[in-house]
Image (cartoon, rainbow, N blue to C red):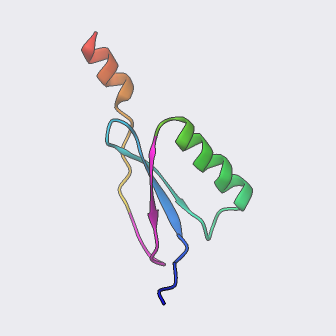
Amino acid sequence: MITKRKPTGYLATCQCDETIGAIDLNRTSRKEASNILGQWVANGCTLTPRFNETWSISLGVCRCSRLAEDES
């Protein structure tokens, strides 16, 4: 039987394909994590779970407003 692992964190990828946020669940209170994850979902971000104890990511800046300006 395979045991399901619990995520140790999440990455938030914006609709413009930039990774704009990361959260370490071991260092964040449940209430604060819930608020942050909920905000990312409300903003249309894709959440990607991380399962390892150590992970790193380079964060970018959302380009959505610049993309909208370029299309005008």
* Above-or-below relation of 45 to 9: above
The location of residue 18, given as percent across then percent down, is: 34, 43
Which one is in front, 9 or 3?
3
Residue furthest to the right in view is 31
Which one is in front, 28 or 7?
7
* Above-or-below relation of 38 to 31: above
In this image, 62 relative to 44: left or right?
left
Which image quadrant is residue 50 in?
bottom left
- Residue at position x 46%, y 73% from top? 51
Which image quadrant is residue 64 in?
top left
The location of residue 47, given as percent across then percent down, is: 46, 52
* Above-or-below relation of 68 to 1: above
The location of residue 60, given as percent across then percent down, is: 36, 45
In this image, 40 relative to 27: left or right?
left
Asked if residue 53 lies in the magenta stretch, the reply is: yes
Which stretch appears magenta? Answer: 45-56
Residue furthest to the top in view is 72
* Above-or-below relation of 25 to 47: below
Q: What is the count of numbered marks?
A: 0
In this image, 6 relative to 48: left or right?
right
Residue furthest to the bottom in view is 1
The location of residue 57, given as percent across then percent down, is: 37, 60
Residue furthest to the front in view is 1
Q: Quadrant of the C terminus?
A: top left
- Residue at position x 48%, y 90% from top? 1
- Residue at position x 46%, y 63% from top? 49
- Residue at position x 31%, y 42% from top? 17
